[in-house]
Image: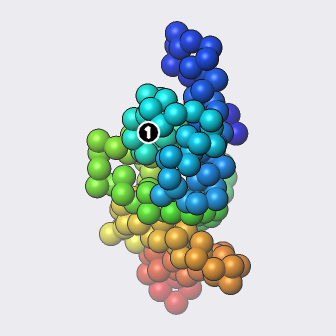
Amino acid sequence: MPDEPAPPGQRADARRNRERILEAAREVIGEQGTDASLRDVARRADVGLGTLYRHFPTRDTLLEALLRTGFGDLTEQADVLAGTDLPPERALADWLGAFIGWAGTFRGLPASLTATLADPQSALHASCLGMREAGGRLLRAAQDAGRIRPDVDGTDLFALVNALSWITGQAPTLAARRDHLLALVLDGLAHPGSRPNG
């Protein structure tokens, strides 16, 4: 997965340190979750903690750098699905399935993503916002087609799929039921008039 580009004009040794920190963070956060020790990240990257903080002043800035590609991929996927001939509710369901799978990449990621809603100053907030807005466009298309309840907004949708990502990350037996659980959520979101007996 490609990382974000290094800032322009950054010295070669600083670029190498940044790349090592991101590589180490991917490993450590993969093992420990999003609350992983930044000291462990610095140790794994073989840099001082001060060097880590020079590149990534907060945990959120480090997470944002790691997750930016995933946010971009999900945003692009939403745009592609919106341009297909799929029924809008199917496009939304496919995107939500991809989101839930991606959000399970790191333990604790759903909680970190949910926290961005309340903190617009967070580095994660802006990066996550584009992805959430892309999902919101799929939601509105399905609502305009009369397939999803009109009282659901993008925040509701984001909260539900984050909760589902968290739940399915808690045990392999729940992970195996991810598609079924998503179908139950989608059934709850369906416009009453779009159901067979609606």
Residue found at x 33% / y 69%: 151
Q: Position of residue 79 (x, y in %)?
A: 57, 43
Rendered location of residue 49, percent (x, y): 48, 37
Q: Residues within 10 Å of mark 1 (few under 14, many from 20)?
A: some
Please state the horizontal and vertical placement of residue 129, each as a whole percent of the image. Answer: 41, 45
Identify the residue shown where x is 64% and y is 23%. Answer: 16
- Of 81 and 98, the residue lying toward us: 98
Depicted 153 relative to depicted 82: above or below:
below
Is 134 positioned to the left or the right of 171 in the image? left
- Numbered marks: total: 1
Task: Identify the element where label 1 is drawn.
Answer: helix
Where is mark 1, residue-wise? 61
Residue 64 sits above or below residue 8 on the image? below
In the rendered image, residue 141, in percent from the top left (x then y), is placed at 48, 55
Tell me the residue at 47%/71% (across/down).
163
Residue 145 vs residue 118: left or right?
A: right
Look at the image and tell me whether residue 26 can be seen.
yes
Q: Is residue 16 above or below residue 84?
A: above
**Left or right relative to 134: residue 77:** right
Outermost residue on the top side: it is 9
Q: Is residue 154 left or right of residue 77?
A: left
Please state which of residues 129 and 24 is positioned toward the viewer in this rendering.
Answer: 24
Colouring rule applied to residues: rainbow
Amino acid bearing label 1:
Thr
Quarter placement of the N terminus: top right
Q: Is residue 77 visible?
A: no
Residue name at image x 56 percent, y 49 percent: 40
Which of the 4 quarters of the picture holds residue 169? bottom right
